[in-house]
């Protein structure tokens, strides 16, 4: 059961947290920190 939970976190929660962190950091840093090529709206 724990292995399943860890797999879920690795596949779903982690990427979600990363994208959330990017959204938040974009609000705090100027746009040049994230070049347009790296941004995913």
Image (cartoon, helix red, strand yellow):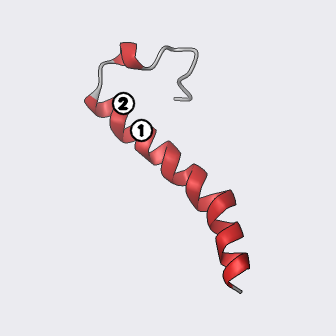
The numbered disc on residue 6 is none
Q: Nearer the viewer, residue 39 or 15?
A: 15
Task: Check if mark 1's residue and mark 2's residue have beta carbons within 8 Å.
Answer: yes
Percent x, y for residue 19?
A: 51, 43
Pointer 2 local density, CA inside 10 Å: few below 14, some 14–19, many at least 20? some
Q: Quadrant of the N terminus?
A: bottom right
Residue furthest left in the image = 28
Dot 1: what SS?
Answer: helix
Q: What residue is disc 1 on?
A: 23
Q: On the picture, is 12 further left or further right than 22?
A: right
Dot 2: what SS?
Answer: helix
CA gap, disc 1 to disc 2?
5 Å
Q: What residue is disc 2 on?
A: 26
Percent x, y for residue 34?
A: 44, 20
Q: Residue at x 62, y 65 (%)?
A: 9
Pointer 1 local density, CA inside 10 Å: few below 14, some 14–19, many at least 20? some
Residue furthest front in the image = 3
Q: Residue at x 58, y 60 (%)?
A: 13
From this view, report whether residue 15 is shown above or below residue 7.
above
Q: Residue at x 59, y 50 (%)?
A: 15
Q: On the picture, is 11 further left or further right than 23?
A: right
Q: Residue at x 55, y 52 (%)?
A: 16
């Amino acid at each position: 059961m724990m292995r399943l939970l860890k797999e879920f976190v690795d596949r779903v929660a982690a990427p979600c947290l990363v994208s959330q962190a990017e959204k938040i950091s974009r609000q705090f840093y100027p746009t040049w920190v994230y070049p347009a090529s790296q941004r995913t709206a």
